[in-house]
Image: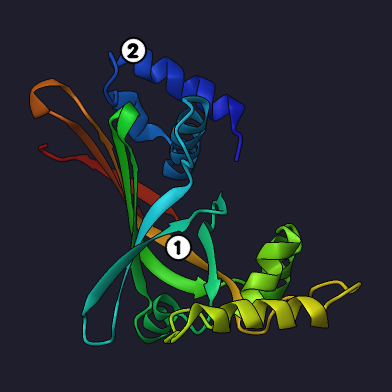
Amino acid sequence: MSTESSKESVSTLEQEGEGGIPRAAEELDPIEFFKAWFDAAEDSGILMPESVALATATSEGAPSVRMVLLKEVNEKGFVFFTNYGSRKANEIEANRRAALCFHWASLERQVRITGSVERITEAESYAYFSTRERGSRIGAWASKQSQPLLDRRELQRRVSETRDSFTDKDIPLPPFWGGYRIRPEVIEFWQGKVNRLHDRLIFTRQGDDWSTERLYP
């Protein structure tokens, strides 16, 4: 997710803004701004900066949240992967709205994203799945994610059986596993400041463009 030009431009803006979010940031594309902040989080040595809280809700609006890993971000949106039988997937299928929250504490930064959710294509899911370690691919086949597990030995048995069934074979993409993309409609950047007088800059999609506004901390 490296974007050197964006990182350099954002770094320059931050110097001008004395560590906050300068006015000039309001003219940036928010996806590119996010990539620059993500690169800065990676460069800072933060453990797993791709970790993000994903909030979903049932069709009745009952919320749930868990940590997932961001695997791709581009102009289309933010991608993560899961078992299509998991709780998060069931809620997404019933309610195509979701939210993400990144928190990079040592940088005093948060990014909040809300939008609609869609499945990515099978080809896109396979492209990522094929890069996973063999053990993780076996685990994806063996796990009935979010289903009741009476005894961990049952999971271990399923892993062993799956490993045996794919001995000396390539492990294909499970038909019940793949990616989702959140298409952002609102992206908020939060930068911590002294005396809790934080900077908050919010981008809201307006057709093919974005509008911006500042929020009180």
Name the image quarter holding the N terminus. Answer: top right
The residue at the point 49 percent across, 28 percent down is: 45
Tag 1 residue: 183
Q: Earlier in the sequence, mark 2 or mark 1?
A: 2
Name the image quarter holding the C terminus. Answer: top left
Q: Seen in the image, is 7 located left or right of residue 207?
A: right
Q: Seen in the image, is 185 located left or right of residue 40?
A: left
* Res. 149 in view: yes
Disc 1 residue crowd, few under 14, some 14–19, many 20+, Cα 10 Å = many
| Residue type, label 2 | Glu
Which of the 4 image quadrants contains residue 201? top left
The residue at the point 91 percent across, 72 percent down is: 168
Q: Position of residue 123 (x, y in %)?
A: 73, 71
Q: Seen in the image, is 63 located left or right of residue 157?
A: left
Q: Secondary structure at mark 2?
A: helix
Is 159 or 174 nearer to us in this picture?
A: 159
* Res. 207 in view: no
| Residue type, label 1 | Arg
